[in-house]
Image (cartoon, rainbow, N blue to C red):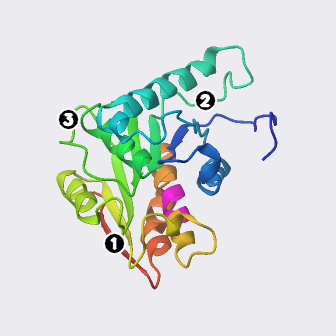
Amino acid sequence: PIPDAPLADGVFPIAHWNHGAYGNSDSYASQTHAIASAGFICPAPSISDNTNIGSVYGGEWSKDVSEVITRTLALNDSGTPFSGHIDTGAGVGVSGHSMGGMTVHGLLTAWPDDRIVAAVPVACVDMGTPADSVDAGVLFIHGDQDPTCQYSLARQAYDELSAPKAFLTHVGADHAAYLNPGFRTFENTQNTLVDWFRWRLYDDTAARDRLAADATADGTRWDAVLT
């Protein structure tokens, strides 16, 4: 990445990323760079209390993400280099891993943000009952041998949601290996993450139609209800 690089020509939707415990935005450079390279403005703040899971269960992280979304959208009319480059009408995407994934699910349930139309909680647990005010397509990504965030709780969260929804399982994988370059199903993580945002925020039906193929490999399982 190039600090303070000029913005590309065009207008781009927002697709947020949230780190997990003990992490920061740089810890997930593979994901944030992939999102930005696919045509999105990707806010990825580093949260100061990154070891305090109570702040996640109390809603502070979800509320912080809503504030980040508000401030990022406001940059479109701010006289900054982002002015005129943010698609404020497309809705917003949110994603994150572990405590960040829980934060994402919180935005669909206990602390809803109705601006969200695309969500990708990675290695999350169930944070509550889906809110009627949020109409988002949700892609879950999880390893079925996760010792930190119980896989069955993410499946429970998936089952509670209406379509469109999907679940990419990394069979035999732990809490985070599939987010790391070089892991056997890393590309499946990256491609489905980007496909989901492209479909939901750009109405890119080709990306939607790629999802099953991009998710499928020796070591993954794909479940989806897209309509």
Of mark 1 and mark 2, the one earlier in the sequence is 2
Residue 194 included in the magenta stretch of the image: yes
Say if 112 sits above or below 119 in the image: above
User: Horizontal and vertical percent for residue 150?
Assistant: 28, 62
The magenta stretch is 190-195
What is the three-letter code of the residue carrying label 3?
Asp
Q: Which residue is mark 3?
A: 132
Report the mark closest to the observer, 1 or 2: 1
Q: Please count the marks in the image.
A: 3
Check residue 153 for magenta coloring: no
Q: Position of residue 104 (x, y in %)?
A: 38, 43
State the image quarter where residue 165 is shown.
bottom left
Give the quadrant of residue 107: top left
Residue at 36% across, 34% down? 55
Residue 89 x/y as whole percent: 48, 29
Q: Amino acid at mark 2?
A: Ile
Tell me the CA gap for discs 1 and 3. 29 Å
Residue drawn at (52%, 75%), measured in percent from left and top? 185
Quadrant of residue 159 within the rendered picture: bottom left
Residue found at x 51% / y 69%: 177
* Residue holding disc 1: 144
Q: Along the line of sight, which residue is nearer the eye, 214 or 57?
A: 57
- Label 3 SS: loop
Q: Nearer the viewer, residue 76 or 149?
A: 149
- Residue 138 appears in the rendering: yes
45 in relation to 150, above or below: above
Q: CA distance from mark 1 to mark 2?
A: 37 Å
Marking on residue 184: none
Asked if residue 129 lies left or right of residue 39, the reply is left
Which residue bears the numbered disc 2?
A: 86
